[in-house]
Amino acid sequence: MKTKPRLSTVQILNMNFGFLGIQFGFALQNANASRILQTFGADIQSLSWFWVVAPLTGMIIQPIIGHYSDRTWCRMGRRKPYFLAGGIMAAFALIFMPNAGSLAAIMAPLMIGAGMLTIMNASFNVAMEPFRALVADILPDNQRTTGFSIQTFLIGIGAVVGSWLPYVLSEWFGIGKNTPDGKIPINVIWSFYAGAMVMVGAIVWTIMHTKEYPPEIQRSFQPDSERQAVEHKAKFMDIFKDIAKMPLTMKQLGLVQFFSWFALFAMWVYTTPAVALHVYGAVDANSPAYQQAGDWVGILFGVYNLVAMLFALALPAIAAKTNRKITHAISLLMGGLGLISIYFITSPYWLILSMVGVGIAWASILAMPYAILAGSVPPAKMGVYMGIFNLFITIPQIVSSIANGPIVKHFFHNDAVYALLMAGIFLLIGAVSVIFVKDNN
């Protein structure tokens, strides 16, 4: 069995650069989808149900994409065709979603917006999973933590720019400040256009500057037993066999992921209405105060992504001094405290401090579980297991989307800040559960 050669930092950056573009678009969606849907008529009780399309499409698509990308080879490569196709489809959805109101003669804008959100999330999932597998495909084990950390760093850059762009266009250039009530602000629409262009451009950069190993060379890096195991003809039903045979480490990480992603989903859905009511005293999604809150939430989301971008660079060193489990546990602890602190804050500027803790957790969530997982998965099935692992991301989001609406309505009396408080507690539980994960280095 041959050993994979180490790559330079520049090569690892090029390999992951496309994820910067994907996260640019993903951040625009996370920071603005709730207020777009509310502007089109969604109420706070049903808001999380519109978001359910994101994890639902991911749960279905990512294992399938992983399964077939493991067995794909063409002139473009193994993983590249999938994230190029996903990026192009997501770009179209970014262009159309904020313009759903102009298609009102065909269908209700809320339904069109929800449909574009569905297409956008399906496309993001098609593009994201192959990028995770690409890092595991190309890098040796002793560079995987670095590879996923650099990926997180680039994700942070894309997310910061994507999150901040509507605020910058509004506050620095005056674009969107005079948008009539009931309309999507121009600064949001232009930001979505920019996201579409950046996404496709970044993915093309990775395609042009990254070389994948052909199947025969990839097989030379595998033990003989694993090489023989993948010689049989691939069948779609093999996905279910792989799920049944998933490694113990993956099952243990699944519990950690449940608490982490339940919390993240609640944060993405409810931060805008929570900050609007708790800090700005605004309830009406068409009011100027609510739109101001929405722009500020974009800044806050940019802050946590900026912190994640910087903290990601420190993750390999922290993991080397402690271990990957301790690093992840501490990070989730900081994120939990950050979300809980929002309940006690009434000044928009102090919310920046809350986002520092969230950013530390986000950096680790994007890197550490994958670094731990990669050491326990057969290389020949890296794509399909990365896709299956996405079930532990999508299932908690689906549970969160279904459960949080009634919880916010009946237990929290439509005060969304309590949903963020609950999310913080879930991150603390995740920090405890990661201690019991078996990490095969």
Image (tube, helix red, strand yellow):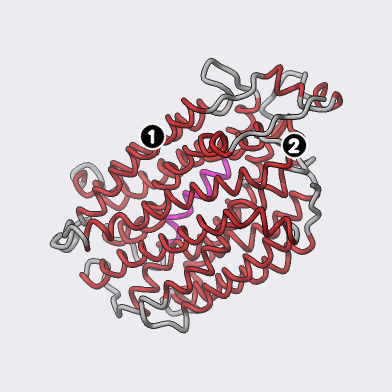
Q: Is residue 27 visible?
A: yes
User: Would you say residue 50 sits in the magenta stretch?
Assistant: yes
> Which residue is more in the foreground, 285 or 425?
425
Residue under the image location 57 percent in, 54 percent down: 313
As drawn, the label of residue 117 is none
Q: Nearer the viewer, mark 2 or mark 1?
A: 1
**Residue 177, how many percent across, how many down?**
17, 62
Q: Amino acid at mark 2?
A: Asp
Q: Is 288 on the left-hand or right-hand side of 377?
A: left
Residue under the image location 65 percent in, 40 percent down: 386
Q: CA distance from mark 2 to mark 1?
A: 32 Å
**Residue 30, how many percent across, how many down?**
41, 56
Dot 1 alpha-carbon crowd within 10 angstroms: few under 14, some 14 to 19, many 20 or more: many
Magenta stretch, residue numbers: 48-60
Residue indicated by mark 2? 242
Residue indicated by mark 1? 200
User: Would you say residue 309 sits in the magenta stretch?
Assistant: no
Vertical arrangement, residue 440 with respect to residue 428, above or below = above
Give the mark nearer the N terminus: 2 vs 1. Answer: 1
Vertical arrangement, residue 191 with respect to residue 81, above or below = below
